[in-house]
Image (tube, coloured by chain):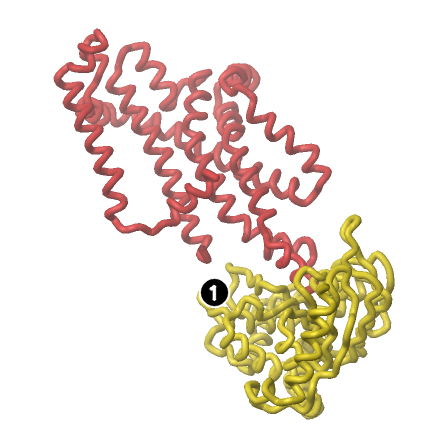
Amino acid sequence: MSTGRINRAVADKSAPARRLLPAAVLAALIGAWQIAASTGAIADALGLEPFLVPSPAEIATALWEDRDLLADNTWVTLKEIVLGFLCAVAAGLGFAVAIHLSTTLRRALYPLLVASQTIPIIAIAPILVVWFGFGIGPKLAVIALVSFFPITVNTVDGLRSVDPEALKMMRTLDASRRQLLLRVEGPAALPYLFSGMRIAAVFAPIAALFAEWTGSSSGLGHMILQDNAQLEVARLFAAVVLLIAIALGLFGLLGLVERRVVRWR
Amino acid sequence: MRQDTKVARTEATDFAAADGSPATAATGESTVSARDLRHSYGDLPTIEGLDLKVQARQMVGLVGPSGCGKSTLLELICGLQEPAGGTIEIGGAGGAAERLRQTAFMPQRDVLLPWLSAIDNAALALRNHGIGRRRARAEAAVLFERFGLAGFEQALPAQLSGGMRQRVAFLRTLLSGKPVLALDEPFASLDAITRAEMQAWLAEALAEDPHTVILVTHDVEEALYLADRVAVLSARPARVIDEMEAPAPRAPDRDRTVTEPEFVAARERALSALREGAE
């Protein structure tokens, strides 16, 4: 399963040499882009004006020159992502435990859960804005809707991952249902929860972008729209870089927290 | 062991009284008796017409071909399942809830919870009974001291050797305070040397703190060495096809015990019963 792979990759306390490899590939790509863009090779090949194809150096310049504007908008988007993500964790945990404890709820909720993921977010986001206005509400709804699915599904799997022998043992040691959940199933589900949260962390920024596109007056998504219209291509890429940084930061932070919390792995 | 047991029993009582700890004191009458037991998985009969009696504070070893339903039998005795027919009584009481109240189950794999320290794993039953963490640890610590685990209290299961893990798993079972212990192949996963060591350790631990024990194993020698009586089960559907007293008294040295003529004869008898039952 892909979540398992992600799990191992993050749990791997690897030598710096392994980190060097992706860094080298990235550096090579940026270098190639820099050369291709600054010599105008890409623009020529595509038949474009050179300003439409900014080089990494130009993006970095935009990042620096518009730092105040970018910082303000990053803060707006970061707030949306973190709050939406937290809503998703709360909802995901609630759903997962409910589904785990009750067969009836499982039958009732699981299909809806899956169906919720088939909702084309782009299609309903505008209507959410009509319903809830331009505030943070519809953004949180969209981000949470996208994020809570991997969290819920992974946590449900985790709660069920306990060795049946351990459950029998605990029953003969007089564990109540609550004790079983808190002492055995809950801790067993923690690594799964973190896997789900890491997947959600990668999707949450994209969801934030969609949410802002459908109606907002600030945020990185809003900025990207405006930069697109004004052909401020370098700044557009700068905003994208920041969005990527948010996703990577969240992903990395979760890995750090997991290493602290899930010490037995 | 029967002779040792009598001495040890007073010791165990003294220990419980001196310490004020009810954790390991097996109380009450705890004879286990199963009559005309029947069980099946769907259409597949797993147990048919099985009779078994275990006297209080005795150990009975159950040997049988693999897949014969030994583990199912343990689950029935523990009250984890109800049989399709027949009765199981522990200390005269019959229902599954009552059996569950009286027995503690030690599964084949140690299933120590990897996120809990050794001592917290051992103290699980005490915590389940609502005893605070500090007191539960203190009670478990006494047993760690007594049973060769001192110094390993804070170790995580992953840091323990196979033998150590089984010791912790056994203490966890013991600390349930239940009079009947159901051990499902407790040493199956260990290498031969550790296994012999653990058998001697278990014999000693139970001599100090006697319980009614049902030991499922596929190892005839283990059953004869540890148990007071050995019941040989047939292939599925399981029933008892031979029952024998284990040779006694036992030499303190395990290697000597298992080479004594009486022991060898019992082993041969059990093995031939097994062979017949497997057919």
Compared across the picture, whether A122 is left or right of B139 comes to left
Q: Quadrant of the N terminus of chain B?
A: bottom right
Q: Quadrant of residue B230?
A: bottom right
Is residue B57 or residue B29 the one in the foreground?
B57
- Quadrant for residue B249, please give it: bottom right
The x, y position of residue B223, in whole percent, is: 66, 77
Closer to the camera in the image, B163 or B68: B68
Front residue of A112/B275: it is B275
In the picture, measured across the screen, residue B123 lies left or right of residue B159, that is: right
The chain drawn in yellow is B
- In the structure shown, which secondary structural element does the residue marked by tag 1 occupy? loop
On the question of residue A233 being in view, the answer is yes
The residue tagged 1 is: B156
Chain of residue at mark 1: B
Residue B244 versus residue A47 in the image, above or below: below
Query: Which residue is pictured at 57% across the width and 86% down the height?
Result: B254
What percent of the width, then of the height, locates residue B209? Answer: 66, 82
Classify B49 as above or below A143. Answer: below
Where does residue A206 sit, x and y in percent of width and height? Answer: 42, 26
In the visual, does B39 lie left or right of B224?
right
At a point 69% along the width and 54% down the height, the residue shown is: A177
Q: Position of residue B227 (x, y in %)?
A: 68, 80
Left of B197 or right of it: where is A75?
left
Res B210 quadrant in image: bottom right
Quadrant where the C terminus of chain B is found in the figure? bottom right
Q: Is residue B14 visible in the rendered structure shown here?
A: no
- Apparent colour of chain A: red
Residue located 56% across and 38% down the image: A152
Q: Amino acid at mark 1?
A: Leu
- In the rendered image, the residue lying farthest to the left is A39
Local packing at callout 1 (Cα closer than 10 Å; few below 14, some 14-19, many 20+) is: many
